Amino acid sequence: MTPLLEARELSKHFGGGLLDRAHTVALRDFSLALAEDRPSVTAVVGESGSGKTTLARLLLGILTPTGGQVRHRGRDLAAMSRRERRTFRREVQAIFQDPYEVYNPFYRVDHVLTVPVAKFGLASSRSAGRALIEAALQAVGLRPEETLGRFPHQLSGGQRQRVMVARALLLRPRVILADEPVSMVDASLRATILGALRQMTLALRIPVVYITHDLATAYQVAENIIVLYRGAVVEAGDVEQVVKRPQHPYTQLLIGSIPLPGAERRWASAGGPPGASPRPAGADAGCSFEDRCPAAMPTCRVSAPPLYRTGPHRVVACFLYREAPTQPAHEMTTAFVEPPLPTRDGRPLARAGE
């Protein structure tokens, strides 16, 4: 079956112009396929500068890839007609980290909700549209009477973010790309927003790509996880296996750097000695984590490791596992766990409106 949204060996380089030939590899050979009949939450995690936001912008068609393709229902975004792109914009919705950039400060916040209702014909009347908007706001923990009619600067960052989540809920998309959707929200409200996204996956069979630096929330909401480092996939697969038994030294560093509760906190010792020389930006040869890896070998500096399949539902890009079979990058998604379809009385749930 044709994937709903697919990334095929995506790469993105910045720089390399006439005056400055140096370039930065923001993303390298990334592949992912989201199936419409297998809704799940896939988390993409990594520290700042790992390529997470670049990936989101490539999947949305905001950036043009240096190599590879983004396909929606089998069609390359670069070759889409105006009608096909309109469908793509409706079916693939984004929630960004900083919602303030989305708002026009001269319009009330109602504008970002009423425009899609009218543009995509979501309601037959103004009152029906108002009811849809109020239901979407309530789903993310906002009171319509305290939200509608106000300007963006009159809302807190968390409130503005929740309005954008409500907008995504309103459109009933087929895919959600959530780039740090709870980074500006109080801890007490994160569960509300993530719960709303999770409910969309289960009830409406909508796959979600959850992009974050927060391993704790990724573990709570995702079935599958992809770990990025300097634009390269270092580990991917079942979130339970990757988080509880990390194999790549960088994933081990991420997991180990989370402080444990108690008077005596234990921190990871991985990551190389303090002051280790950083790997030059844009360096193509060798493993991207070689300069920080406590298990680095001579071959790590010379060539980048392929993905090794170390289990039924996981792959790792590390020469420590070179005895395992290699996994082609474009088949990385086959390492993921496919969750069962949500059912009711033994029958698959239908989408709203079907």
Image (cartoon, grey):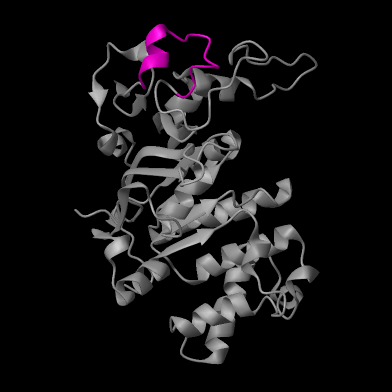
User: Image height check: is 257 above or below 215?
Assistant: above
Secondary structure mostly seen in the magenta stretch: loop
Quarter containing the C terminus: bottom left
Q: Where does residue 292 sit, x and y in percent of width and height?
A: 55, 17
Relative placement, left or right, of 212 versus 121 is right
Which of the two residues, 332 or 186, is positioned nearer the viewer here?
Answer: 332
Q: Does the segment drawn in magenta span residue 105?
A: no
Which image quadrant is residue 165 in? bottom right
Q: Residue furthest left?
A: 1
Residue range of the region highlighted in magenta in the rendering = 288-304
Q: Is residue 223 visible?
A: no
Q: Where does residue 49 sit, x and y in percent of width and height?
A: 57, 38
Relative placement, left or right, of 20 versus 84 is right
Which of the two residues, 63 or 34, is positioned nearer the viewer here?
Answer: 63
Residue at horizontal 73 percent and vertical 22 percent from the top: 261
Relative placement, left or right, of 220 versus 68 is right
Residue at horizontal 25 percent and vertical 22 percent from the top: 326
Which image quadrant is residue 334 in? top left
Which of the two residues, 52 or 311, is positioned nearer the viewer here?
Answer: 52
User: Image height check: is 128 above or below 216?
Assistant: below
Q: Residue furthest front?
A: 19
Relative placement, left or right, of 151 versus 191 is right
Residue at horizontal 52 percent and vertical 47 percent from the top: 53
Q: Where does residue 108 sit, x and y in percent of width and height?
A: 70, 79
Which image quadrant is residue 13 in? top left
Residue at horizontal 36 percent and vertical 40 percent from the top: 30
Q: Is residue 267 visible?
A: yes
The total number of labels drawn is 0
